[in-house]
Image (spheres, rainbow, N blue to C red):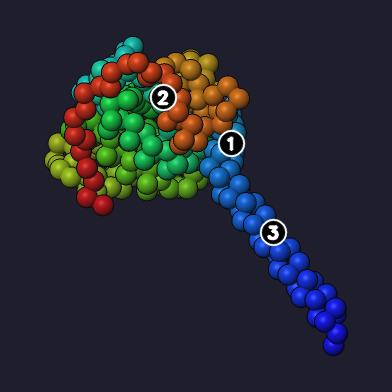
Amino acid sequence: MSEKNRDGKRTAREQLKIDREKQQAAEKRKRALIVGGAVVAVLAIAAVIGVVVANSGSDKTSSASGPAVAPKGAQGKDSLAIPVGASDAPSTLTVWEDFRCPACGQFENSFRDTIHELENTGQIKVEYHLATLIDGNMGGSGSLRAANAAACAQDAGKFPAYHDVLYENQPEETDDAFAKNSRLIELAGKVDGLDTATFQSCVNDGKHDSWVKKSNTAFQNSGYSGTPTVLLNGDAVFPKKGDESITPANLKKWVAEANKGKKAGTVSPSPSTTG
């Protein structure tokens, strides 16, 4: 084989190697873009589900009976908001949720760590409002029962941890597992000090049922399109804020922009879960 032919084959092999490396780099960038867009895509689908939930059917649990007994520490108009985080935080994240709502579960499981980080550094407080849309659309009472149990957890000062446990153990939308008080009490065992006789009585007696129904009526009269509805200082941020889709990084950025030049709130420890 002549030297010229050897040089030609060597050059061809080198070019082939370069082409393969370029292709691998392109595929790596493509995979990164797919992963980076996964949260946005999932939440965009979840947002559509939320709109469908809000606009279909009627809520069969909307007629309250008896006085509305708000949980301890509830705030806002008619005491319908459960606050979490520093009361003097410079920004407020308002969240309307339904514990049976799959879109709410997607939101919570995607943004839980980010929201807790912002709470624990005094950058935001969160005001949770509870709705029971799925009960009306799918039948059953799991939304109502879970919301009452969450309000009972608020009475015990354990709402944040129990709220997270409910979403971490959320059943399928068509499975009304949360309608069973026994299941809600079982899940309370995952939160330190929550599963007490007082909590069990509160859950079994439906102490806050009328309050939950009043909260749901407030949601239906609010003009919001579905759950979850998420507002930062009154401006919608789910599934996007302006032209930007919500992501953990964007939520942090939006909060930082809102808090520019403002002092962080005073933070106190939050109840933990036992796992």
Which numbered disc, 3 or 1, marks the residue that appears first in the sequence?
3
Instruction: Name the residue: 42% across, 43% down.
Output: 109
- The disc labelled 1 sits on which kind of residue? Ala
* Mark 3 residue type: Lys
Between discs 2 and 1, the one toward the N terminus: 1
**Image mark for residue 22:** 3
Marked residue nearer the N-terminal end (3 or 2):
3
Residue under label 1: 44
* Residue 191 position (above or below residue 246): below
Percent across and percent down for residue 41 are: 59, 41
Kindly indicate the quadrant of the structure image that contains residue 160: top left
Whole-number angstrom distance, CA of label 2 to CA of label 1: 21 Å
SS for callout 3: helix
Q: Residue furthest top?
A: 77
Residue 82 - label: none
Q: Give the percent coordinates (x, y) of residue 153.
A: 23, 34
Q: Classify mark 1: helix, strand or loop.
A: helix
The image position of residue 133, as x and y in percent, is 48, 30
Question: Which residue type does callout 2 highlight?
Answer: Val
